Amino acid sequence: MIYLDYQATTPLAPEAREAMLPWLAGPEAQGFANPHSPHRAGRAAAAAVEVARDQVAALLPPGGRVVFTSGATEAINLAIIGSGARRLAVSAIEHAAVLDTARFVDPDVALLPVDPAGLVDAAVPYRQGTDLVAVMQVNNEIGTVQPVDELARRARAAGALFLCDAVQAAGRIAAPSHADFIAISAHKIHGPKGIGALWVRDGVQLSPLIHGGGQEGGLRSGTLSPALCAGFGAAAALCTSLLESDRVHVEKLWTKALGLFPGWTLNGSAEARWRGNLNVRLPGLDVARLLSECRNIAISAGSACASGSGRPSHVLRAIGLSDRDSKTAVRIGYGRYTGDDELEQAAAAINAAARAQGVI
């Protein structure tokens, strides 16, 4: 299997796996201890959690705190609902975790439009009385990088909070420096599934969604997993140390990928983009048939959360594609562990499958 679905999830880094193992150990090692217990084993587990918290915080701006959650979806819910905001504005190409939560809170949520390149205008007006604005830093389907710092500054000037879904950006590009909330997920940065974090700017008030023992500073009750925290922290630390080499590698793969798909049309901006995302389309392409014929290659037709729904991508609709054209797009995602030869082999198979349909 050639894995090219990095936007859905990333391969677990060996270093993250190794960091987790001591906290999955049996009775003799006592790595299983509850990090909220006062005895020595519990204190050791708690110390591992705090080391991980510092490692994750290093990916985020100073002047805030990291709250561990079960993932980015919970982090986003905590920010939107816990902030007490009632009048919301979100970009039209947000992930369902933002869109659906925003609609739950505000059925009349304002959708900020994007241009054909998939970008929100930094000067887009916010309706009067907006309490919270949410714009993702890097889109999960087409990879566009939004002007989140300018949007956040304007939100603050208008008296609104700003939430940034940085799931696809964390560990790859600099975190937004003017947001009030930043949501990230471990499994998108080569960490384990089942854990994420919400960064909360100092001084911003937030109410918990989950009540009980008062863990995570009273914002997220429940026993933390030292193993998941340690894996998340190790993955974050690796992103910090490999930031430049990862970027160079992805740029190289992007340049190669552009030459491997002649005749395909790129969806989204080629410039304001995380280049580990190649979303392309071919007129008349039957994507379901292509995916079936390329079953040894892990690619997708869009967001993993919406796969199998049969609905056209709301992201591709928002950039002006028809439903027919939206259904001819494939998303190819690569990164740290992708080799040149894997990309070449996958492109050859994808193009062969498209030629068999007579669309190339």
Image (cartoon, rainbow, N blue to C red):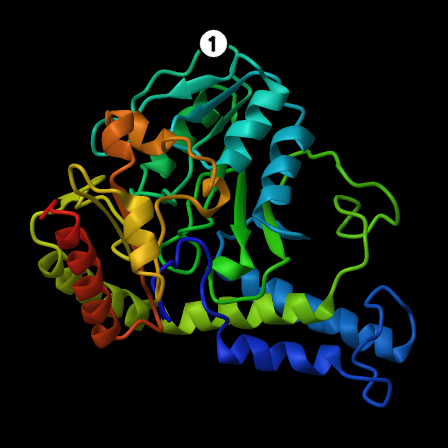
Which residue: 36% across, 42% down?
139
Q: Based on the displayed image, in which of its 4 quarters is residue 219 positioned?
A: top right
Three-letter residue code for mark 1: Gln
| Residue beneath disc 1 | 128
Residue 124 point in image, percent of width and height: 32, 20
Q: In the image, 94: left or right of 124? A: right
Residue 74 point in image, percent of width and height: 64, 43
Query: SS for tag 1?
Result: loop
Observer-nearest of 84 and 108:
108
Vertically, is 300 above or below 28?
Answer: above
Residue 161 point in image, percent of width and height: 53, 28
Observer-nearest of 260 and 186:
260
Q: Residues within 10 Å of mark 1 (few under 14, many from 20)?
A: few
Q: Residue furthest bottom?
A: 28
Which residue: 17% across, 48% down?
357
Observer-nearest of 179 and 231:
231
